[in-house]
Image: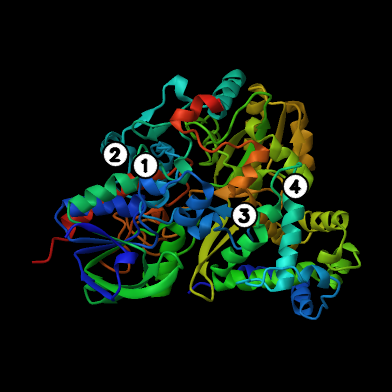
Amino acid sequence: MAMILQGKDVTTPVRENADVCIIGSGCGGGAAAKVLAEAGRRVVVLEEGGYYTASDFDMTEETAYRNLYRERGGQATDDLAVTVLQGRCVGGSSTVNWTTSLRTPEFVLDRWEHVFDVKGLSLKELEPYFERIEKYLNIHLEPEEHHNPNNRIILTGAQKLGYRARAIGRNTRDCQEAGACGLGCPFDAKLSVNVTYIPDAVKAGAVVCADFKAENIEVIGNTKRVYGTVIDRATNARKTDFVVEAPVVILSAGAIHTPALLFRSGLANSSGEVGNHLTLHLTSAVLGMFEGVVYPAGGIPQSAMCDEFLNTNNDGGGFWIEAVPAYPVLASLALPGFGDSHKALMRGYKHIGASIVLVKEIDSEGSVGLNEYGRPVISYNIGEKDLDCMKRGLKTAARIHFAAGAKKVLTLHAEKNEFTSSGELDEGFARARWGRNELSLYSAHPLGTCRMAEHPLRSVVNSHCETHDIGGLFVIDGSVMPTSLGVNPQLTILAVAEKSAEWIAENFPRPQ
Amino acid sequence: MPGTFSRRKFLKDTAFGLIVLSAARFIPLDRAAAALKNLPDQLKFFSPMEFLIMENVAGRIVGTPAPGMASVEDVGVALRADAFLAGAEPEIQNQLHELLAVFNGALFAFLFEFQFSSFVNMSPEDQDAYLNGWMTSSLAFRRTAFQALKRLSLTLFYTDPRAWEEIRYDGMFLPWEREKKQ
């Protein structure tokens, strides 16, 4: 029976058989579920988070962080230096992202092909998938008059400085421009996975189980058993347990929790590469103080970008600048210092413009391990080149803000680092401290911890996302990306997921 | 298998942090007795002293409200922290208990900042100076600890609608209210 089963409906242990069991319901798991269910497979999707619909989204940070984010938005690296935002609900991070939908840059795909020997993921081969998904999710550019003041800072400032800036593709239909994309869309206008792929998968016969947390996987001959607990959403306590048995298991729990699940299960790590090569698309921001009202939480959160500075040196690195919806908590955490000086900055909330700088890493090193409780621990060391790139990006973003009319610009340093003109930037940046927890850093795009490559000693999965070690065990999510993308990863993950799921449908016929 | 890591290990890996953690348990908690009498009696996570520390920390981090505006006491930040941490993972809970003991300890206030009393017994000005010392410390684990306290305090304050009036945040742009806000 096609359905979405929730933990609240379950009172006794669950035993289920399927053709395909998918762990995670975000971009990777959701897209794979739709393709495989429509290909006639009996699909069971296990999602640790809850199932929420538009009426549950009240557009407050309180509700959103509690219900929709990992660790209530507090997931971070081991030293708390980088906050790592991920969704934890049906639809995964797509439920809470800011709708930016960009194709993978060609230089990234070229590198995957030539350095990692990845096959079948050239731009030409992915193009039909991008086109199909863009149509399915109504990915489009916003007309000029729909950019909010916060996005206009980028467009106006970059234009004055001669930098390339333009509208971003967004997966929405009938957007109400409420600004709530990051808190769950209460209008179902954002075409996230929870309102597109998942309902279509269910329509095709998939069973989606929310509040079902996969704990480990056992391989028995050609079959696999996924063991886990059904969670009481109110208390996060164990309610009962479940086992799902299937010949094909797909891990789509994201770049932090997929390697953790493989570690707990003792699987797919003959290369020793599980958990390695974590990239975060390292992010910080500048805050401009404007005379007029910006209201950084209102209107379309992210509709414009400055993409002038990606891969400019042909080193595969560079940075990217986008607007960020500074909801009150986000703004309060970003602003420097504490106490009365912090409060004074918060009183100017309506006049804050905020732009993020996202660095495509080339020499940082990150990994995911397990702690003594079996939960993932994120370690990350910023490389010198990437830190230099972040500094260049922040300076550029600050110049854009000044060109757009900012009276003051702040970086996210713990100690106030404030500028009143572009001319002060070089000296101020030289004086500032850049160590751990001296500059607020974020990530919403963790990737790469189950790297894809053809060589089994260098990677965890092959070009079809199947683990080198175990036939029928797949990883389909951001974990498989061989390198940082340099752009928001939603569209790349969807395309890779659809392509890999098609391969599974062709190569794992339904058991008779 | 990967090595085991934790934020606690991060503290312990710092030699100074190790000394601090082991000695923190022996610090007497003395002059806060009066304030402790008025604390809520149904705490789920904090001890009464920890509650008092959290309330003081949150008050200094969030800052003084303008007249008539909500304070951390009005919002109940420490109580909200108590409820929030009661549901946190055990490793987070252990780290918070240890952090608060270290942060408030008079010996450490002396060692770190040459202050002669525990945090809860300091004047507001001394508390600000003490917090600033943690925020700007050359020891990474102290900066990490400050960030943990800052995040907890600000998140639990600014998620409450009562905190929004002072910053003139009117909520999201509901289509039918857009003109009013723009």
The amino acid marked with disc number 1 is Leu
Asked if labels 1 and 4 share a chain, the reply is yes
Q: Residue A292: give x, y in percent of width and height.
A: 65, 23
Disc 2: which residue: A133
Q: CA distance from mark 1 to mark 2?
A: 8 Å
Q: Residue A21: give x, y in percent of width and height.
A: 26, 64
Q: Are marks 3 and 4 in contact (CB under 8 Å)?
A: no
Q: CA distance from mark 3 to mark 4?
A: 17 Å
Q: CA distance from mark 2 to mark 4?
A: 44 Å
- Asked whether residue A236 is in view, the answer is yes
The amino acid marked with disc number 3 is Leu
Disc 3: which residue: B156
Q: Earlier in the sequence, mark 1 or mark 2?
A: 2
Q: Which disc number belongs to residue A337? A: 4
Give the letter of the chain under mark 1.
A
Quick one: SS at disc 1?
helix
Asked if labels 1 and 2 share a chain, the reply is yes
Disc 1: which residue: A491
Q: Are marks 1 and 2 in contact (CB under 8 Å)?
A: yes
Give the letter of the chain under mark 4.
A
Front disc: 3 or 1: 3
Quick one: SS at disc 2?
helix
Q: Residue A134: give x, y in percent of width and height.
A: 31, 35
The amino acid marked with disc number 4 is Gly
